[in-house]
């Protein structure tokens, strides 16, 4: 399978970014649970413009992350894995299963309770961590599996964005929403007029973000909308979309996501933290990510192939798909993001974060070990049929 230079850049930046993300998470947890706890937490509570630093990271900088996700999704739709209906359906249907089954498991345990809003927490896959885990397997990983996981994770994130827009919006300020959408419409007109300069799009994006922020819908949605307003052209290295996407890879991977991890893993781990894992909410998150993700991704993919809706790439087998399904349980960034929208109670937020981190570690290790065995057998000449 031919892989574009931009995809390779994306894969390698996400891989390295995942390593940095992991280090930041450990660093933040250690500081939060040390004698430096008050000083460290105060950094994120320091107010700028009437809001704490954590707020600007989650509602401001993360919009840039969603802009990058939107640009990658746009590329996949126009010229990538999602440009061919037959090829696109496999990761799309897999992602659907990877969202519905985990959410269903959580809801089974929490439906009708104060924590039922947490059903969206185990739905998403963390692109950076998942690709970082896959990259540890080296050159044994087929290109088609990298593309499948990337497309799956991007679609997963789009699903999470839609869930945020429709299910985690309390009340709408219609005037602000209409202004934001009007700005989006104006940017689309600029696109149709073949305006290629990035400045008016970025300026319009800031205005759209401001009014979206005050509309009741989470401001990060403006990042995705902006991505689809930016001209794609033919997608070559001179296109506006390509230039912006290439410039955003490293700042997002090495600055924005690490800052998000540092700001949102200030979790004091109590002595009875294990008891918190036995609550219905924590169990729903753990089961959703560790069990629901691989089952949903594998089962929906298998059914899609059996019903002839899509086909498995020739160099992959169902063990590979199940392994990617396990890696899909690394929910970290998006799961924590949804947690902050789902709950207001600090106790629920902290126990959810602990469950997310434990589940993500389990999924990362489990997926790595599973795929390592699969590829090791292939290397030594295993004669077992692929399908």
Image (cartoon, rainbow, N blue to C red):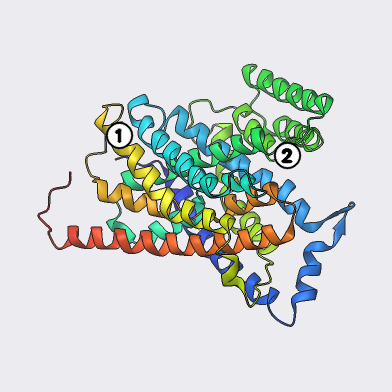
Identify the residue position indicated by label 1 in the image: 303
Q: Is residue 311 above or below residue 296?
A: above
- Labels 2, 1: front one: 1
Dot 1 falls on a residue whose secondary structure is: helix
Q: Quadrant of the N terminus?
A: top left
Residue 239 picture quarter: top right
Residue 12 versus residue 131: which sits nearer the camera?
131
Residue found at the very far bottom of the displayed protein:
35
Q: Is residue 240 above or below residue 152?
A: above
Vertical relation: 305 (above or below) 387: above
Residue at x-position 48% and y-position 64%: 361
Q: Quadrant of residue 90?
A: top left
- Quick check: 42 left or right of 111? right
Q: Is residue 130 left or right of residue 36?
A: left
Q: Residues within 10 Å of mark 1 (few under 14, many from 20)?
A: some
Report the disc number at residue 314.
none
Q: Earlier in the sequence, mark 2 or mark 1?
A: 2
Give residue 372's position: percent from left, percent from top: 29, 62
Which residue is at 56% across, 61% downward? 355
Which of 187/32 is in front?
Answer: 32
Q: Position of residue 102 (x, y in %)?
A: 48, 46
- Residue matched to label 2: 219
In space, the residues marked 2 and 1 are separated at their CA atoms by 36 Å
Write the residue at 32% across / 43% down: 144
Q: Residue furthest left?
A: 383
Out of 65 and 281, give the one closest to the viewer: 281
């Amino acid at each position: 399978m031919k892989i574009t230079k931009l995809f390779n850049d994306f894969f390698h930046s996400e891989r390295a970014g995942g390593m940095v993300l992991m280090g930041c998470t450990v660093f933040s947890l250690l500081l939060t649970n040390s004698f430096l706890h008050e000083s460290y937490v105060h950094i994120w509570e320091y107010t700028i413009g009437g809001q704490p630093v954590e707020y600007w990271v989650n509602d401001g900088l993360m919009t840039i992350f969603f802009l990058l996700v939107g640009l990658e999704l746009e590329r996949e739709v126009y010229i990538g894995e999602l440009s061919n209906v037959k090829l696109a359906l496999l990761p799309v249907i897999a992602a659907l299963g990877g969202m519905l089954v985990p959410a269903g498991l959580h809801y089974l345990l929490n439906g009708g309770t104060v924590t039922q809003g947490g059903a969206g927490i185990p739905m998403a896959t963390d692109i950076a961590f998942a690709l970082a885990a896959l990259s540890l397997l080296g050159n044994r990983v087929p290109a088609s599996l990298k593309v499948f996981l990337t497309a799956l994770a991007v679609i997963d994130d789009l699903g999470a964005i839609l869930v945020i827009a429709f299910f985690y919006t309390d009340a709408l300020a219609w005037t602000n929403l209409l202004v934001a959408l009007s700005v989006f419409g104006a940017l689309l007109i600029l696109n149709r007029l073949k305006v290629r300069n990035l400045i008016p799009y970025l300026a319009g994006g800031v205005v759209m973000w401001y009014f979206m922020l005050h509309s009741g819908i989470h401001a990060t949605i403006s990042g995705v909308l902006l991505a689809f307003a930016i001209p794609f052209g033919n997608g070559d290295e001179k296109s506006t979309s390509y230039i912006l996407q290439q410039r955003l890879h490293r700042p997002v991977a090495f600055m924005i996501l690490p800052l998000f991890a540092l700001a949102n893993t200030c979790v004091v781990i109590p002595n009875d933290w294990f008891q918190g894992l036995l609550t219905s909410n924590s169990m729903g998150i753990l089961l959703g990510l560790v069990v629901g993700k691989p089952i949903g991704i594998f089962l929906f993919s298998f059914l899609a192939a059996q019903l002839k809706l899509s086909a498995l790439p020739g160099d992959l087998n169902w063990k590979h798909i199940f392994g990617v399904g396990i890696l899909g349980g690394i929910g970290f960034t998006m799961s924590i993001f949804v947690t902050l929208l789902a709950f207001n109670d600090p106790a629920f937020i902290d126990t959810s974060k602990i469950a997310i981190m434990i589940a993500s570690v389990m999924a990362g290790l489990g997926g790595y070990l599973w795929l390592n065995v699969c590829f090791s057998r292939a290397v030594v000449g295993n004669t077992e049929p692929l399908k």
